[in-house]
């Protein structure tokens, strides 16, 4: 290890008499050399956690302005129809990819919210097999035929309960109604 740490950067250039370094400078040089060899952990963590941002409006605007400048320089557009079509297709593709990325972000956040809401449902409210089928659906795992059956069963149960809920709403309004006394 000392062989690696005693490189030219620490001891001086080859062919010349080595420069006299203080003990602190040697230790600092060794630390730098170790970081070069194994990589700085804080830098690698930052590299791994960087999310690729969706296409920003500024990128689209810059691309559009580049197209406008290119178009302003042209005097005879009939010969450039193919190039103009390509520019427009590229602009449209940028818009579509931006929309797709936004939809994915929204869909992921909605699914996370649904999973959190599902965790709040009491386990005794629904059967275990229905709960398993819902879990598979939420986490996008492959469903079996029995899972599909239990999801349809749950849908029917929910429709029935919602119908009953309307009647309970009417009964609640009747109970909340205050009788007016005749004066």
Image (cartoon, rainbow, N blue to C red):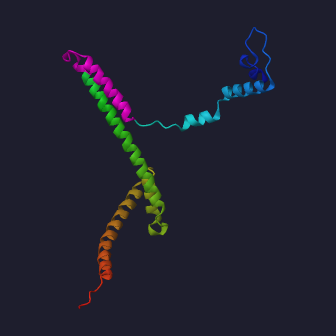
Q: Is residue 135 above or below residue 88?
A: below
- The structure residue drawn at horizontal position 69% and vertical position 26%, both measured from the top left corner, is 32
Q: Is residue 80 magenta?
A: yes
Decide which of 75, 53 is in the foreground and name it: 75
Q: From the viewer's perspective, is 8 left or right of 48?
A: right
- The structure residue drawn at horizontal position 55% and vertical position 36%, both measured from the top left corner, is 48
Q: Is residue 142 visible?
A: no
Q: From the viewer's perspective, is 77 left or right of 39?
A: left
Report the span colored magenta: 55-83
Decide which of 119, 24 is in the foreground and name it: 24
- The structure residue drawn at horizontal position 56% and vertical position 34%, both measured from the top left corner, is 47
Q: Is residue 169 above or below residue 129?
A: below
Q: From the viewer's perspective, is 41 left or right of 123?
A: right
Residue 89 is situated, as x and y percent measured from the top left of the image, at 28, 28
Residue 40, quarter of the rendered image: top right
- Main SS of the magenta part reads helix
Residue 41 is situated, as x and y percent measured from the top left of the image, at 64, 35
Question: Looking at the image, which residue sits at the far top?
Answer: 15
Question: Looking at the image, which residue sits at the far bottom?
Answer: 183
Question: How many numbered discs sit on the rendered protein?
Answer: 0
Q: Is residue 106 above or below residue 159?
A: above
Q: Is residue 74 above or below residue 157?
A: above
Residue 53 is situated, as x and y percent measured from the top left of the image, at 44, 37
Decide which of 158, 68 is in the foreground and name it: 68
Question: Looking at the image, which residue sits at the far left?
Answer: 78
- The structure residue drawn at horizontal position 73% and vertical position 18%, both measured from the top left corner, is 7
Q: Is residue 66 magenta?
A: yes
Q: Is residue 21 visible?
A: yes
Residue 77, quarter of the rendered image: top left
The quarter in which the N terminus is drawn is top right
Question: Looking at the image, which residue sits at the far front?
Answer: 183
Residue 183 is situated, as x and y percent measured from the top left of the image, at 23, 91
């Amino acid at each position: 290890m000392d062989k690696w740490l005693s490189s030219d950067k620490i001891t001086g250039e080859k062919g010349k008499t080595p420069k006299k370094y203080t003990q602190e400078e040697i230790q600092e040089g060794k630390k730098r050399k170790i970081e070069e060899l194994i990589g700085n952990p804080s830098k690698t963590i930052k590299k791994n956690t960087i999310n690729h941002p969706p296409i920003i409006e500024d990128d689209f605007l810059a691309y559009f302005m580049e197209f406008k400048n290119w178009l302003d320089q042209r005097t005879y557009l009939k010969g450039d129809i193919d190039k103009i079509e390509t520019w427009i297709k590229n602009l449209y593709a940028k818009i579509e990819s931006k929309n797709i990325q936004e939809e994915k972000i929204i869909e992921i956040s909605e699914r996370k919210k649904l999973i959190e809401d599902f965790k709040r449902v009491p386990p005794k409210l629904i059967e275990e097999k229905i709960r398993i089928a819902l879990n598979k659906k939420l986490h996008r795992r492959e469903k079996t035929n029995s899972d599909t059956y239990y999801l349809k069963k749950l849908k029917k149960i929910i429709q029935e309960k919602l119908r009953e809920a309307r009647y309970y709403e009417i009964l609640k309004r009747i109970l909340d109604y205050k009788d007016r006394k005749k004066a």
